[in-house]
Every structure is written in structure tokens, then in C-alpha cells.
Image (tube, helix red, strand yellow):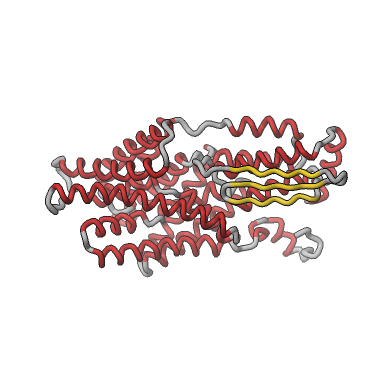
Amino acid sequence: MDDRIDCTTDKKAQDESVDMRDVLDLAMNMGRVLLKNGAEIFRVEETIDHVCGRYKIGDVESFVMSNGIFITARDETEDIYAKVKHIPISGFHLGIVTEVNDLSREISAGKIGLKEARMRLEEIEKMPPKRGRFRILAAGIGSGCFCYLLQANFWESMIAVLIGCLLYVFVIFAENHRLTKIITNIVGGGFITVMALLALSIPWPFPVRMDKLIIGSILPLVPGVAFVNSIRDIANSDFISGIVRIVDALLVFVYIAIGVGFVLGCYNKITGGGWI
Amino acid sequence: MDLIGDIIINMFCSFLGTIAFSVLFNVPKRFYICCGFTGMAGWLCYLICINGASVSTSTFFGTVLVVLMSRILAVWKKCPITVFLVSGIFPLIPGAGVYYTVYNVVQGNLAEAAGRGIGAIKVAFAIVLGIVFVVSIPKQWFQVNYWRSRFRGASENSDL
């Protein structure tokens, strides 16, 4: 494995003179894109190491946290590079993580030059999320399927499909208007409950249970990526980042619970404790 | 006959539902089928275990299978493990427990709420344990070359 990388490295390294700054800027940018789109801490660290290792920059130290990257490096001429980058926690896009991962593989195998890699990274970063209609449909289908898995009947699942779609229309609206996570999840949870209560008030010819509807359609709001990433960070002993991320994930659960609980409580007051 | 139909519907729903959630996380198209199978395997494992074990134990075994499959697929498809792991684990997330906790808190049944809440936390810890156990397995064990060189007795020459 090592031999193959070495010979290609020599070939490429001769036909382009690499500046340490360019390499480290590229490494930093790749790390930033990875971290922003929901990669684990060790993946970011490994990517930086791979890129630097490919261009034989020896004295590199990187320190990655859930919302920042610090890199320092020194070459033979005692030139020192140091950079700190702040990266706010934002949405997740696993497609971008996959693409950057492929790019880092290609760089460390020596298949791609520095300039090319920079251009590829810019393209990858502009990769849009899936189209709105597609995601709305997916949220609906996901809600319906999991509603059915939790022992709901067929018609309840169909109502959950509808609620899931409507919920995601709201989520995409919130994304476009840059509403904060708190508002999105509290209003989203409340919205689901209102819809479920509305669905209950229609006299359907089949039994409809509110709990199944809500449990099914709540799932598109659940912070799966944050939860799994935080566990993996803690498993890798990146405790600071892991705890920051698990708090992020747990707070989303709390927000959803506040939304659902608020609407249920109001309904309880209005109807005087009479539950359907 | 009814049982077989039930199993098929369960398989189909978990497959489709997992794919739907992988769409929400913007997973590239070429991984959809693998994500679906990961979620399906996890859910089936959960269903088999639930006959003889508690919810949290079944969730643990389901999670272990999901993480194992994700690691194998991640090595095979050369992509981050997160892609399969996040979508595959979705059927096992204790959404129901969280909902019943809130419901009972609002209704004033605090004892019931505490029971449900602790149940949800137990399931969450089962997921955490499942992930941590399988993630701790050394990376080389998932690479074919490692076992090939082990069996040839050439392990001292390998760069692992």
C-alpha cells in the first residue's frame, strides 16, 4: 500500500512545485466542508493528515472540534503556517461528505493534482440538496412506513403520509427563511399535533389513534445524524465534540416535546380534559 | 400464511422507510438500495429478538447488526460509514417512548411518564452500546486482504 503511494507521489511532486500554504489551505477547506456537512471528528482529522501526508508536509498538528479547526505546520525553511477556522453547526448533507471522502482518497492515491482538487472541492461545496418535492414525498413515505411498523393500521399510515408531507413543506419553508432550529422544531412538533387532532375530529369509517399518527409523523424531525455522530465521537474519545453534539441532538428532542406537549396541553384545557 | 404476509409487509415498510430517510439526509442515489437493506436487516433482527427478549435488548441486537452491516458496506463501497449507519438505525429510534413520556406529563400521570421516559432512555443506551461495541472492532478485520494474509501466514510481512 505504502509503496504505491510513494512512487505516484514522486511523479506528481516533480511536475508541480507545491507551496505548503496551498496544501494546508486545501486541507483546511476540505476539513471545513466535511465538518459543516456532518462528518465525524476523526474523519476530518484523517482527511487533513492524508492531504498533508501526500505532499510530505511532516510537521503538521491539527486540532478539530465540533465547531472549529486549528492547524499549525512548519517546513524545513522554518516557515510557520497557522490557521484557525470557526465553523458554526448547521445542516447535514451526507452526499457532500461522501464526495469529499472520495476526493481525499484520490488525493492520497496521487491521482489528482492540487489545482484540480481545489476546483473539485469548490464544485462539491455547491452541490444542492435534493429537490424540494422529492424530499417532501420522502418525508411522507418515511412517516407512513414507520407508522405502519409501529403497529398502526393501513389508513392511519396513509394519514401519517399526508401529515409527514405537510410537515416537510413547513421544514423546507423554515430552511428557506433561515428560521432557527428552536422555532422549526417547536412549531413542527406543534403542527403535527394540530394536524393529528384535526384528523381525529373527522369521523372516519375506521379507527384512528392519535398516538400512532403523532409517533409516525414526528420521525422526519428526529436528529439522526447528530445523534449517531455524537455517539461515534464519544466512542472515539473525542469527548468535547461528542458532548456538544449530543446536547444538540437532545435539545432537538426537547424542542419537539415542547411543541407536542404545548398543543396537547392547550387542547386539554379547551376541551376540559376530555381526550379522544 | 398470515404470518408470512405480515413479515413481507414489515420487510417492505422498513426497506422503503429507510430509503425515504436516506433521501432526507441527501445520501447519494447509488447507496439507496444498500441503505434500505441495512434498515431492513436491523428491523427484522429486532422483530425476531422481541419474541423472547425485552425492547432494549432487542434494540441492542438490532443495532449491532445495523452497525456491522454498515461497516462491511462502507468498506465494500468505499464511502463513509455514516451514510448507512444513520439511515439504518432510524427504525430503532425510540420515538414512541419520547411521545408517550410527553403525553403522560401533559396529562398529569407523572409515574407513568417516568416509566416511559426511563424506557426510552434504556432504548437509547442500547443503541449507544450497540454502536460503541461494533465501532471498537479493529478496522483491519473488515478488510479482505487482512484475512487473506493471515491465512497465508504472511502476517509479519503485511503493513498492518
- Front residue of B109/B13: it is B109
Residue B112 position (above or below residue A22): below
List x then y, in percent, for residue A106.
71, 40
Q: Is residue B49 visible?
A: no
At a point 68% along the width and 50% down the height, the residue shown is: A46
At a point 57% along the width and 60% down the height, the residue shown is: A239
List x then y, in percent, for residue A216.
32, 48
List x then y, in percent, for residue A178.
43, 34
Viewed as shown, does residue A210 lie left or right of A215? left
Residue A35 position (above or below residue A236): above
- Front residue of A15/B66: it is A15
The quadrant where residue A165 appears: top left
Residue B107 position (above or below residue A87): below
- Front residue of A20/A145: it is A20
Q: Is residue B48 visible?
A: yes
At a point 50% along the width and 52% down the height, the residue shown is: A245
Total numbered labels: 0
Viewed as shown, does residue A137 lie left or right of A71? left
List x then y, in percent, for residue B100.
28, 57
At a point 77% along the width and 66% down the height, the residue shown is: B153
- Front residue of B71/B127: it is B127
